[in-house]
Image: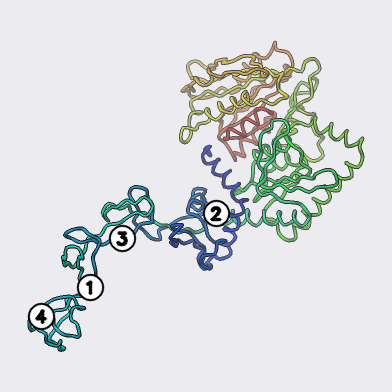
Amino acid sequence: MVSEIEDKIQRERREIYVEPNTRELLRKLIKNRKEGEIIPSYHPALGFIYELKGTKKGDDEHRYTKAFLENLVRLDILEKSFYDSISTCPKCKSTATTLHPSCTKCKSHNIAKTSLTEHIPCGYIDQREKYAKELCPKCGKILVEGEYRNMGRWYICNECGEKFEHPQFNLICRECNNSFSIEEANVQEVPKFILNQKREKEIRQNVASLESISKLFTDLGFKVEMPGSMIGQKTEMEYHFSMLARKQKESDELIISVDHEVAEEEIHAQPIILYIYKISEMKVNVPIFMAMPKLSEAARKIAKGHDILIIEGTPQAQDMTQIKDEIEKRINQICFVQSKPNEAVQSATESEEKPPLPKAAVNSSSHRKTPLRAMLKGLKLLGNTDNNTADPPSSNSKPENDSRRNIVFLLDGSSSMTRGNDGLNNFAIASKAIKDVFKNPDPKAKNDFLSIIVFWDSIMKGLQKEVLYEDLPMSTHNSLQKLNQFEPKKNAGTPIWDAVEYAIDFLQKKRGHKIVKLITDAKSIPSPKNGTIKKLENSSTRLDCIVVGSEGNVELGKAINNYELGRFYESSNTEYLALTLKS
C-alpha cells in the first residue's frame, strides 16, 4: 500500500517537474552527465551558493540555493553527498565567521607574527627586523653566515610583550557578533548534489514531454502557463494543472488544459477520474492527459468516454505532428460550433447535463425491467466496454417516481483495515473520505440521503454490524462523531455477501434510487451468492465495489468484472476515494 505521505510526495514531484527553474536545471544535468554535479562555493554576502560544475563562476542563471536543492532531494529527484565541512556559529548557525589569534597571557588580539634570530657568539635572541644593518643589537658585531640561526616563526604581544610560538584562537560571528572558541563552534557539512540515477528515465520523460507540448502550444499562438491554475465555476475552489494554454479567439477565449502522470508500468484510473472532476468545474476546450509510459485499459476507456486527448509515452518528433493536427482539428470544430448560435445553446445545455465523473456511474433504477447481469455489464468501469457500445445513461438521470437517492456506505470494519504505515491505515483513509463527502458535498446531491453501516465478523458470531447513521440528509451539515469513535474489530474473515444482503434489506422500504457502496480492503473477492444476485436484481439496487489498499491488483479487478458486480474502483488516497464515493 502506498501511504498518503508517499502519495503526497509523488504529487509534489509531478508538480515541480513543470516549475521552470527545476525543468532548466534537470535539462542541464541530463545534458552534462559527466560534469553533472552541483557544487558549493562561498560568497561573502550570500554564504555558500551552488553552481553547476563546469559553468562560468558568478553566472546567476546557473546559481541555486541550498533550500531549493534540498527540496529536490526530499522529492527523490536529486541525491546529495559530502563535499566539505565548516565551522559555524553555535548561536545563530551563520557561516560568516572570522578566525582571530590572541595572546596566551593577556588574551589581547593585538599581536604580531614574526621570525626570531639567535646570534650564536653572544647568545642574543630577538626579532629579525631588530638586527639593523645586519648588526647584533647586543654585541654590535656583523652577522656572519654560520654564526646566527633562524629560530622559526613566533608571535609577540604588542600589549604585554609576551613571546609565544602558538597563539590561542577564537572566532567571531559577523552576523550576531558572538565570540566563541574553536571547541565551541558547530561543525556543518557542506554537501554537493547530483541527479538521482534511479529517476533519470522519469525525469527525461517529464522534462522532454512537457517541453515539447509547451513549444507546440507556443507555435499555435497560445500563451502557456506551466503550471497553471483556474477557479472552479461551481465550487470556487482553485484547481491546479500541469499546464494551461490560452488563446483569444474573436470574443471568446480558447483554453487547453494538460495534466500528466508518470508510473513505472502504467497509469491507473484514479488520476484520470481526478482530472475529469477538475475539468467539469470549468470551461476547457481541449482536455489533454499525458501518461508516461501508458494508461491502463480501464483508464483509457474512461478518458475516451470523456473525449480527452491522450498522449502516451514521451512525444517524439514524428508524434508531435499528429498531436498538433488533432489539436487544430478540435479547435476548428469548436469554432465551427460557436458560429451557430442555436447549436451553441444546445451544446451548452448538454454540457451542463453531463456528470462530472465517469460515464460508468449509472443508476440501476433506469433498468428496472432489465436482467441484473446484463444491466451490470453496462455499469462496469473495467471489462467488456468497447467503442461500439452505446454510452449508458447519465448518473444524474432521475428515477421514474422520486429524485431521492438512498445510499449506504457499507464499510468493512474488520481488523485488517487497521494495517498501514505511519498510522495511515485503510479504515482511517476510508473514514476521512466519507467525512469529505459530507464536508464538501456535490451540489447536485442535496436530495441524497446517506446511511453508514460498519460490518465485521468473528467465527463464533458470524455477521456483526452496526448502523452508525441512517438517512443523513446531504442538504444539512452532519457531524460524524460515531464514525470517529468506531474501532475496527478483530476477526477471522469478512462476510462480504452477508453484509451486502443486510444492506439490501436495510434499503428495502426506502423510496427512490438504492445504492450500496461496499468499501473493503479485500485482496480477493469470493464468488457472490446466488441469493445476493437475486436480491440485488429484485430490489433494483446498484452495487459499487470500492477496494482500498489494492492498487495494481489486476486479478482482483478481473474477478469483480467476471462476477459482473457493477463498478470496481481501487484507491488508497483519500482525495481519489472521496471523488469515487461522490460519483
Say which label, 2 or 4, has the lower sequence index. 4
Can residue 196 be seen in this snapshot?
no
- Marks 1 and 3, how far apart in space? 19 Å
Say which label, 2 or 1, has the lower sequence index. 1
Secondary-structure class at tag 2: helix
Q: Which residue is mark 2?
A: 199
Mark 3 packing: few (<14 Cα in 10 Å), some, or many (20+)?
Answer: few
Q: Nearer the viewer, mark 2 or mark 3?
A: 3
Q: Which residue is mark 3?
A: 99
Mark 2 packing: few (<14 Cα in 10 Å), some, or many (20+)?
Answer: few
- Marks 3 and 4, how far apart in space? 37 Å
- Marks 2 and 3, how far apart in space? 43 Å
Which residue occupies the foreground of this view, 267 or 355? 355
> Which disc number belongs to residue 138?
4
Question: Height in image: 181 above or below 285?
Answer: below
- From the top left corner, tell me how far across and down residue 419 is, in percent: 48, 31
Q: Residue at x 73, y 33 (%)?
A: 233
Secondary-structure class at tag 1: strand
Q: Which residue is mark 1?
A: 114
Q: Amino acid at mark 1?
A: Thr
Say which label, 3 or 4, has the lower sequence index. 3
- From the top left corner, tell me how far across and down residue 14 is, in percent: 60, 47
Mark 4 packing: few (<14 Cα in 10 Å), some, or many (20+)?
Answer: few
Q: Amino acid at mark 3?
A: Leu
Horizontally, residue 476 falls left or right of residue 223, namely left
Which residue occupies the foreground of this view, 13 or 464? 13
